[in-house]
Structure formats: C-alpha cells, structure tokens
Amino acid sequence: MKRNLFAFYKYRRFLIGISACFSITTLLIFFQISLGEAGFYSYKDENGKTHYTDDLSKIPLEYRESDKKLKKHKEAPKDTSTISVPSGNTPAPIINFGTPGRIASGSEIQIPLKAQGNSYYLDAVLNGGVRAKLLLDTGASKIFLSKDVATKLGYNFANVNSKQTSSTANGDTTVAAIALQTVEVGTAKSYIVEAAFNEKYDDDDGLLGMSFLNDYRFEINRDKKLLILKPLTEGEMEWGGKPGSWWKKRFDYYDENIRDYGRAAKAWRRRGKTHAAEYKYMKDYFVDLKYRLENYARVSGLPDRFK
C-alpha cells in the first residue's frame, strides 16, 4: 500500500532540462488583492484615455483619491479592449485582448529562426518589456528561463515560495514556478503562460516550450528557417483570440490540477509529511491561474458554457 501511494504521488514529477519535458509543482504566491477590493476599476488619464484594471494598486494615487475620476465596476467591461491583470511580484503591463467574439481569420504568422548547430533560437518579449533569445524546444512542457532573465522580470529565486525538487538524469534540481503575463513572438501573443527557472541554468536565456506553442497549430520549416504559427481553428468564433474548445480545455486543465494536488496535499498531511506543503502550493498555484483565466474570460466576453 505504501509503495502504491508513493508511486501515485510521484507520477507528476517530470525531468527538467534543455530537451526534456518538465513539470512545475509549486505555487508562486501572488494574491495581492484582498477579497474586499476585488472588482474592476476605470479611470481617465490627463489625455482623456480610459484605462481599466482589476488591481487598485496599479491606479495612480491622484486618480484613486478622486471619486469623479475613478469608477468601480461589478463586472469586467465587455466593450473595451484594455485591462491590466495582476502578475504577482512583477509589474503588470496593460494588455490588449481584442474585440470579443471575432471570427478566426485563419492567417498564419511566420517567425524567423536562428540556427545554431542542430538547434533553433527565436526572439521573444516577456511581460511586455523583457527581451530574450529562447531555444525552440517542442519537447519541453513549459517555458524555462535562465536566472538572469528571471531577475530582469523581477523574480528572485530565494524569494519565490513556489519551489519543488525534481529528479533529473543529472541529479535533483530545484525549480521555481512562475506565470508569465504575456509572451510575444513576432506578432503572436499569448497570455497567462506557465514558466519556471532555477539558479543553475544560465547557458542561454531559456527555452520556449509547449505552454506557449499549444496556443497555436505550428510547424517548423527547416529549409526557410521559419516557425509557422496558425490559429487553432478557422472560420469559428473566437473570444480573446481563442476558440471555445481552447477555453474549455484550459479550464478543465486547471480544475483537474486543483483537485488532484488538493487531494495529494491532504493525504501527505495526514501522514505528517513535509511533502504536503509542496502539493498545497501547487493547488494554490492553479487556483491563481484559474482566477486570472476567469478575468481574461470576462473581458473577452466568453459564454459560460465554455467555462
């Protein structure tokens, strides 16, 4: 029985490396908004432009102190394209989700690749301002970043609570889990992208894995050295640039992990094991990702049937 329990709770630990798929199993605690402050706010700047955000701390003090300039909304505005979503311990950029309910155009995006030996690299912009040269790795489940890039994003390994020790071919490796607010490659842009970093990986800026690539249909043209990204569907309705099936799959993925890691944490806690904290952090990590996705869905006008 003990052996079966050990195998059950160990199955989510994956290899982490440059060409290996790895799994992030801890929480980055970035709940910075109290329940009492939850909601959406809008204000007009000095140029008359209206800004929307769900993080009161991101609103300049001069607008927070003026009842005439600041408004609170019970729900996210569905007729606007700008909203700021909290990103934990790094400043949240103002991002554009586009018009809700558009028909997919079917157009493709071609990304130049830089060949180095048998590997391909591409340029990416993280969280709206940090540039990185990432190794294209379709065998990696997440984006993995170097310590230097993580530092530029505002993350300090010692201060990130979401850590887990995973077994690799080269021994145990401790990684920190984070969620990138935005990842831009060419004109392609993804939101709420899972990533990780540690203190040992510093050879490159990092690698681009499936947590970004799964947002598209993609192919690699080695002759022309291009990464070709296409919409997941053609001619179907999209919300926030993604079809209903993408939204449903993402919500189900978060719910499944919240449930599984919650059960694992309780089981380890009953046995008085320190592993319980790791699984608790992982559950909370996915709770936060789901919270962000729900905000994204409201802004995008997503129908409830896809949640």
Image (tube, rainbow, N blue to C red):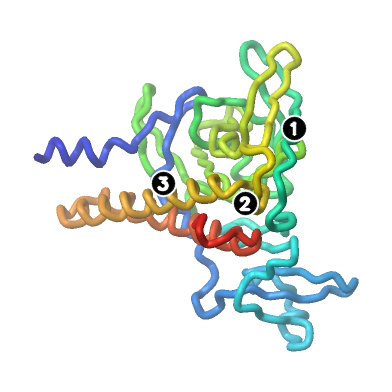
Amino acid carrying mark 2 in the image: Gln
Image position of 147 (left or right of 108)? left
* Quadrant in which the N terminus is drawn: top left
**Horizontal and vertical percent position of residue 217:** 62, 31
**Horizontal and vertical percent position of residue 83:** 70, 63
Instruction: Give the residue at mark 1.
Output: 109
Q: Which mark is residue 198?
A: none
Q: Which mark is residue 163?
A: 3
Q: Closer to the N terminus: mark 1 or mark 2?
A: 1
Rounded to the nearest angstrom, the CA distance separating label 3 from label 2 is 19 Å
Rounded to the nearest angstrom, the CA distance separating label 3 from label 1 is 35 Å
**Horizontal and vertical percent position of residue 108:** 74, 32
Q: Closer to the N terminus: mark 3 or mark 1?
A: 1
Amino acid carrying mark 3 in the image: Lys
Rounded to the nearest angstrom, the CA distance separating label 1 from label 2 is 21 Å
**Horizontal and vertical percent position of residue 210:** 54, 34
The outermost residue toward the bottom is: 67
Q: Residue at x 64, y 70 (%)?
A: 76
Mark 3, Cα crowd under 10 Å, few <14 / some 14-19 / many 20+, is many
Looking at the picture, tell me which residue is in the foreground, 269 or 288: 288
Q: Residue at x 80, y 71 (%)?
A: 50
Tell me the element at label 3.
strand
Verify CB contact (< 8 Å) between mark 1 and mark 2. Answer: no
Q: Residue at x 72, y 21 (%)?
A: 226
The outermost residue toward the right is: 47
Q: Which mark is residue 181?
A: 2
Amino acid carrying mark 1 in the image: Ile
Tell me the element at label 2.
strand
